[in-house]
Amino acid sequence: MPGQIEDKYGLLSTLAKRRGFFWSSFEIYGGVGGFLDLGPLGLELKNLIVETWRETLLRPHGFVEISTPIITPRRLLVASGHVENFKDPMIECTNCRRRFRADQLVKEKTGIETEGKSLEELDSLIKQKGVKCPECGGILGSPQYFVTMFKTSIGPYGEDVAYGRPEAAQGIFVDFRRVFEVMREHFPLGIGQVGTVLRNEISPRQGPIRLREFTIMDFELFYNPQQPDCPFLSDVANDNLPIVTEETRRAGKEEVTKIPAGEAVKRGLVKAPWAGYFMCIALRLLKKLGINVASVRFFEKLAGERAHYSLQTFDLEVLLDRLGWVEVAGIAYRGDYDLRKHMEATGVDMSVFQAYEKPVEKTVKMVRVRHDRLRDKFGQESGKVAKVLAGQDLLALVSGKGPVKAGGYEIPMDCFEVKETRTRETGSRFVPHVIEPSFGVERLVYAAMEYALRMKEDRVVLSLPFDLAPFQASVYPLMNRDGLEEKAGLIYKLLLSNGIRTDYDEAGSIGRRYARADEAGVPFGVTVDYDTLKDDTVTLRDRDSWKQIRVPISQLAATIKQADEKGFGKF
Amino acid sequence: MPGQIEDKYGLLSTLAKRRGFFWSSFEIYGGVGGFLDLGPLGLELKNLIVETWRETLLRPHGFVEISTPIITPRRLLVASGHVENFKDPMIECTNCRRRFRADQLVKEKTGIETEGKSLEELDSLIKQKGVKCPECGGILGSPQYFVTMFKTSIGPYGEDVAYGRPEAAQGIFVDFRRVFEVMREHFPLGIGQVGTVLRNEISPRQGPIRLREFTIMDFELFYNPQQPDCPFLSDVANDNLPIVTEETRRAGKEEVTKIPAGEAVKRGLVKAPWAGYFMCIALRLLKKLGINVASVRFFEKLAGERAHYSLQTFDLEVLLDRLGWVEVAGIAYRGDYDLRKHMEATGVDMSVFQAYEKPVEKTVKMVRVRHDRLRDKFGQESGKVAKVLAGQDLLALVSGKGPVKAGGYEIPMDCFEVKETRTRETGSRFVPHVIEPSFGVERLVYAAMEYALRMKEDRVVLSLPFDLAPFQASVYPLMNRDGLEEKAGLIYKLLLSNGIRTDYDEAGSIGRRYARADEAGVPFGVTVDYDTLKDDTVTLRDRDSWKQIRVPISQLAATIKQADEKGFGKF
């Protein structure tokens, strides 16, 4: 079939290198697995994706962004549970001494889902199924855990152990109180952080997908668990969420349930309304990146597969060539786990007092024992009876009709006095609950590029959305003489001053330059030729259709912006 | 004196915390020296500074930006010389076992400049001057070197040692060939990188200034050492550079020589023309950040103080309250040191062939020994004479008049034949030389804030330049009722859509809101009151003069932009 691409992964890897999107780090040193360099175009694409995240998730809601260190003291990550839980099962070949991730190895060799399996379960699977070393065929040892954080120490003593942060979220939790105060105690409060995280993977493969160092866009929404509703949910309640539910998965299936977000929350499939909202926001973000939302699903994690802090997690997965379903984001309901852990570790109060709009008046019943009556009735025994009653829920005791029975005594109702009092509560104090949508930026870069990849005739075209293209236009002087290059230079500056990200390319034949721009994802080409010098018009070429039209320079910027909005076919 | 601030450092630290610019990391865990958190306003300010750097240094010159990992394999940093040279002298108290940076301690206690001093020199200074432990007064041990990089290891074996990068530059050097190809072999080539660097300081102090983790803006300009001229230098040749020259410093002085950039290059004070150009660019960048260029100097490093790779280095220093002269940038002439080291370590050719515009015809003299004549003259000895001549610069030997004297022989001129041949060189091959302007971003954030700090009456005003203000305007509904808040919401959106970074603040009295905005550096306040509902005008308040004018909503955005350009006093 024409236009079909057999190996998108391979094609994209070479294109990415050739055009300067990305390549493996430390190439001249023979490379080290799990590290990626971004070239000029890849970095711009990445920055545009981060900016799109800010425009989609932060700004419309008044949420803020902060920045905290990568190096993190051990005691903080002990409190957060990472030192205990952030580990993978590792296995060593008894023959060649190579080390592998045990769960991945077993899954690959047996097809059995191994996420969340214990070391013992993995060990017995390996023996039962006869899994051998994939490199030398040797016998594998017993799996053991390996902490997948990069370890180091701070300062000159060596005892002050620290790790590279495995998520940017902890910096947000630790700063919650301070940001809450800075933000004039607005609530709910959303805090994001974009930054490098480090995960010391045992055997990273899959090029740009499984990285030891990558950029995360973490975001934590803090809300009052007594008021869990999300005021924005109604705006997206009809957006369809494609979910592989926990129930479906427990039945051994992977079918997608398509369900409107509002409905998913109402039926309890998605436990927190804010989670439902952010699932919709995540889909909208993916759409803006040009990713086909029909190839996307929310894969609910089973209890054993979830991170240690999570009450419910959906992995947002995108279907990729060769790699299959790849997680590009996770929506986790972290409850009050993290704030509570840091409270316990530091003694710093992380709870929040939130005033009600109006104070709430409540009637409270109070029950008092009438010791005078008790003495009348029980005489010398009355002390013992009083002891029996002490520490009991008196309100429950007197709620029945007959005399109260307690400790073998039968106590008449007139020994109790029930009083009603009115109280005013001005607000409530609580440890906030947290919903976290978290995105892996390099994976989004890769997914956006793969979904933009097309073949047209025998050429590769990277059809990135206009707003996401590192260069949105490129200017080409037909020749480097006769004043063409000067005119082209002026047009280049004109487009830049109109806010269009513009490249300038004068090297090689026009055909070669067009082909190069198609690969680099440049939506529009502007060719300056000898007619331009006569009538101030240029040729405007569309990357996707290869159509060309003639446009006066005075209308060029507007035409490019319009062409993007209306589609080039309109001209 | 009114308006004078006694302790800017102290004032700024509390303001920064209160308004959410920055604060010490891991506060609730008791803090760890050398780490800084950026709050919402500080992060925005930082991002704007990075953007200003791109606008000033990268885009106008067609330079590019890339991104490479923080974690760096040891072998790369061995090659670059960092494992050998990136260290500080450390000293331990024999009594309390606390550790200090020996050179800083000696400098503080004796006033003697210690940068670049050897361990022996420091040791004898300590003994001679009787420097004691600053904490307990105990006797100090002998200084030893401490590698100030964070050490870790990659992968599950523990043997693959790596460090957190101490500079972003190495990623650029290692990628030079690839980016050179991606950029269609354009030359000179400029490559920048903004990113986190890690330096495991022995005893960091000075809050946001001496950090163990910070953001660097590194930039490497690669050029042909045979064509060292910078084509942009003439644009800035008359910009004055305030330099404390090596010569001045060797005379024990710190006087500033003010000299135009072109002149400084011509006189050889600045060795490389590109370095002179970037010194001007650096000053222009500081100006855009609102830093008073009269309080700035280029402090040339002496040979012993320079980094191991540098042929010439100027620290760009800014005078700060309490901290004195603080380095915010460095301009280093790195020669071909780094590329050559990586070539040697990897065997990968880093040299570049650059075609001349026209092939160059050259006449080359070649000298041949006439062995027949040698035999005639020296007989059996001729073999020995030939040996003496082999490997000598024959052209130099025959350039004189008389007979050639070599190895005790006197050889007549007719034993040599001089031939002239014409060659065509189409270009030249070379290992590029490098000029590096490198900026510390957090220090720029701090310096920009300190230079923006003013007292007006008894209030603190942060007079950040309009383009640098995290929020450029703030909208205030006078009351939260009667439709004022709705109107204010519309105006808020109107300003945002006009590209003005806008805040919305409805909490507390108008006076308190103004004061808060002054501290946060918001240049303009927009107050929505009951007249607004009648006649669609608002009060526009200027942060610096506290003047207020009445403006129709329809002209609000334009007035704000104009007010910034013209100065508010014009209205």
Image (cartoon, coloured by chain):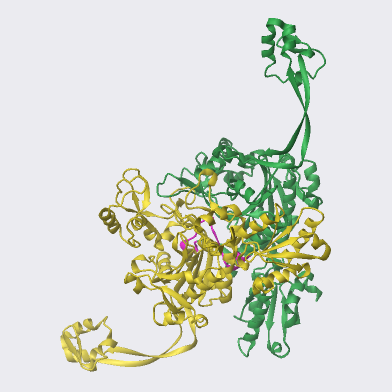
Chain colours: A green, B yellow
Q: Quadrant of the N terminus of chain A?
A: bottom right
The foreground one among A411 and B345 is: A411
Above or below: residue A2 compared with residue A425 = below
**Horizontally, is B333 left or right of A112 in the view?**
left
Above or below: residue B206 compared with residue B246 = above
Q: Where residue B301 sits in the image (x, y, percent)?
A: 38, 68
Q: Where residue B184 sits in the image (x, y, percent)?
A: 56, 75
The answer to whether residue B527 is visible is yes
Q: Which residues are magenta?
A: A26-44
Q: Where residue B279 sits in the image (x, y, percent)?
A: 47, 74
Q: How many numbered marks appear?
A: 0
Is A35 inside the magenta-drawn segment?
A: yes
Q: Quadrant of the C terminus of chain A?
A: bottom right
Above or below: residue B294 compared with residue B88 = below
Which residue appears farthest toward the top when viewing the image?
A380
Q: Quadrant of residue A542?
A: bottom right
The foreground one among A221 and A257 is: A221
Q: Where residue B209 sits in the image (x, y, percent)?
A: 48, 58
The foreground one among B378 and A333 is: A333
**Horizontally, is B437 left or right of B472 in the view?**
left
Which residue appears farthest toward the front when viewing the image?
B1
Q: Quadrant of residue A415?
A: top right
The foreground one among A498 and A527 is: A498
The answer to whether residue A217 is visible is no
Is B290 inside the magenta-drawn segment?
A: no
**Horizontally, is A169 left or right of A147 in the view?**
right
